[in-house]
Image (cartoon, rainbow, N blue to C red):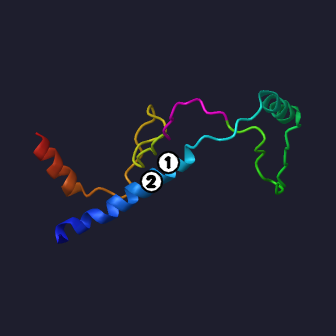
Amino acid sequence: MEILLWLAPPVVVTVVAMLWVSWVGRERAELDQDEAVRRLGAALDKEPRLRRARTRPGARDRSTPARSSGVAVRRTPPRPRGLPRNPDAPPAAPATPVDENRRERRERRAS
């Protein structure tokens, strides 16, 4: 018997859902076709209510939203700091003086 107690909440929820669906789906009073057309015409003849929001000075004009092209555009990545702006320009002198011994060791390793 204890094993079946865990079934009680789902059964209750299912029964309540079935009752709710049967109440929502009940047959309602028919509306006269002429009355429905009259209501529709009255709703379509109304002027739409437009509210203008107050704008702060300097606020962006939202009356014409930015048009999306549907294409995602990534930002250009930042340039590395060590590269010169003009690729044809000669490289700038290093910021710290290079030790002569270090330069000689580097040349020996390269050969």
x and y, in percent, of residue 88 in the image: 44, 31
Tell me the amino acid under the disc marked 2.
Ala
Task: Determine if the magenta segment contains residue 73.
Answer: yes
Q: Main secondary structure of the magenta part?
A: loop
Q: In the figure, is residue 99 to the left or right of 90?
A: left
User: Which residue occupies the foreground of this view, 90 or 38?
Assistant: 38
Residue sitting at x 40%, y 41%: 91
x and y, in percent, of residue 74 in the image: 48, 38
- Local secondary structure at mark 2: helix
x and y, in percent, of residue 110 in the image: 13, 41
The residue tagged 1 is: 21
Residues shaded magenta: 67-75
**Gap in angstroms between the C-alphas marked 2 and 1:** 6 Å
Q: Is the C terminus in the top left, top right, bottom left or bottom right quadrant?
A: top left
Task: Determine if the magenta segment contains residue 46.
Answer: no
Residue 102 found in image quarter: bottom left
Q: Is the N terminus in the top left, top right, bottom left or bottom right quadrant?
A: bottom left
- Local secondary structure at mark 1: helix
What number is the disc on residue 17? 2
Q: In the figure, is residue 78 to the left or right of 53?
A: left
